[in-house]
Amino acid sequence: MHLPDGLLSNGVNSFCIPVSAALFYVCNRNVSKNLDETRASIAGAVTAFVFAAQMINFPIGFGASGHFLGAFFISLILGPYLGFISMTVILAIQSLFFADGGVIAMGANVFNMGVIGGFLSYAIFILLNKNIAFFSTRPGFLIASTLTGYFSVVAASFFCGLELAFSGIAPAAKVVPAITFIHFFIALGEAGILFTMLSFILAVRPELLAGYLKGEKEEFKTRGVKEVEAI
Amino acid sequence: MNRISRSSFFIFIAIAVLAAFFSPLASVNPDGLDWTIEKNTGPAVADAEKSDGSFLFPDYKIPFIKNEAASTIFSAFIGLFIILSFFRIFLKSAMRRVQPDACEKNGMKNSRNAL
């Protein structure tokens, strides 16, 4: 879903770049106030994992492939602000060093994957997690986060399709359904990887996700585990 | 960094390294965006979509490494190195901004140990 340069119109770029830049500024200010060694270290490692995971394209049929997006996963582990910065770092490195996504189109890519895939999806997940008791139990958390991860990819692709349509690449009636359709299948891979990773983390390092689980955050806090403060 | 943070850090790094070694197995089929563009636009747009090769490591390949798999794995490690370096610098600058005095005495010493 990494848009290259030369596809999007100036109008679309003029909308996406300021929105993404403004959100990056807000996140940077927020994160800088309470960044410590623990959060920065884990952020570096999680970001490195998502970067490497994004390199592995898996076949999905129809002669197409997809890869892990990871924006929602990063937001879950690091919180939405640091998660957005991490996603922006990944997209910037992919664009500047590996020609994966355009430099001018970085604003649109950050908008699709960071704002929609990360921020919006995280907000929806939090609504579910905080308002429906079942989603703050371990099985409920896994179900809610897997479904939100699925949604994050489809929603990001929908906005990507809209940007292509507004840029005059193809009519909206053709390109938006097409890109959303193929991402219904790619999102299955995302949901599978997300479910596997979150189950693994719950088994070996539940501290990282304790903020979403009823009663567990308080338990870890009383034991003096710092990681639960991060989210 | 305490014991739990350190182990969390190394778990994610270990999975990232594992993923880097598996990266040459990535499917060569076009991704969702490329597939959509190929199916819904003319060849001119599809050609414009391809990179012009003026990047350091285009398509996750190191130009001077002939073996494709080794080239992809090595480029993945370069990416991981850049990301970890960024967060190290980010941590230092954030700590300097928030606690300039404490940073002089203790913070910078601590941040050097991070990552």
Image: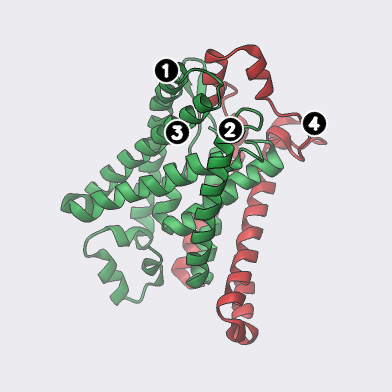
- Which residue lies at the image location 38% right of the left edge and 26% below the top edge? A184
Mark 2 or 3: the one toward you: 3
Of all chains in the rendering, the one displayed in red is B
Residue underneath mark 3: A159
Judged from the image, the secondary structure of the residue bearing numbered disc 3 is: helix
Residue underneath mark 2: A3
Question: Can you give x and y, in whole percent of width and height, for residue A112 in the image?
Answer: 48, 39
Residue underneath mark 4: B66
Residues under numbered marks 3 and 1 in contact, where contact means CB atoms less than 8 Å apart: no
- Which residue lies at the image location 42% right of the left edge and 52% below the top edge? A75
Residue A56 lies, with reference to residue A78, above or below; the image says: above
Judged from the image, the secondary structure of the residue bearing numbered disc 2 is: loop
Q: CA distance from mark 3 to mark 1?
A: 13 Å
Q: Nearer the viewer, residue B15 or A71?
A: A71
Q: CA distance from mark 4 to mark 3?
A: 38 Å
Bin the neighbour count of mark 3 within 10 Å (Cα to Cα): few under 14, some 14-19, many 20 and up: many
Q: Earlier in the sequence, mark 2 or mark 3?
A: 2
Q: Earlier in the sequence, mark 3 or mark 1?
A: 3
User: Which quadrant of the structure image shows residue A153?
Assistant: top left
Q: What color is chain A drawn in?
A: green
The image shows a total of numbered marks equal to 4
User: Can residue B31 be seen here?
Assistant: no
Label 1 sits on what residue type? Ala
Asked if labels 2 and 4 share a chain, the reply is no
Mark 4 or 1: the one toward you: 1
Mark 1 or 2: the one toward you: 1
Q: CA distance from mark 2 to mark 4?
A: 28 Å
Residue A50 lies, with reference to residue B8, above or below; the image says: above
Label 2 sits on what residue type? Leu
The chain ID associated with circle 4 is B
Question: Can you give x and y, in whole percent of width and height, for residue A192 in the image?
Answer: 38, 36
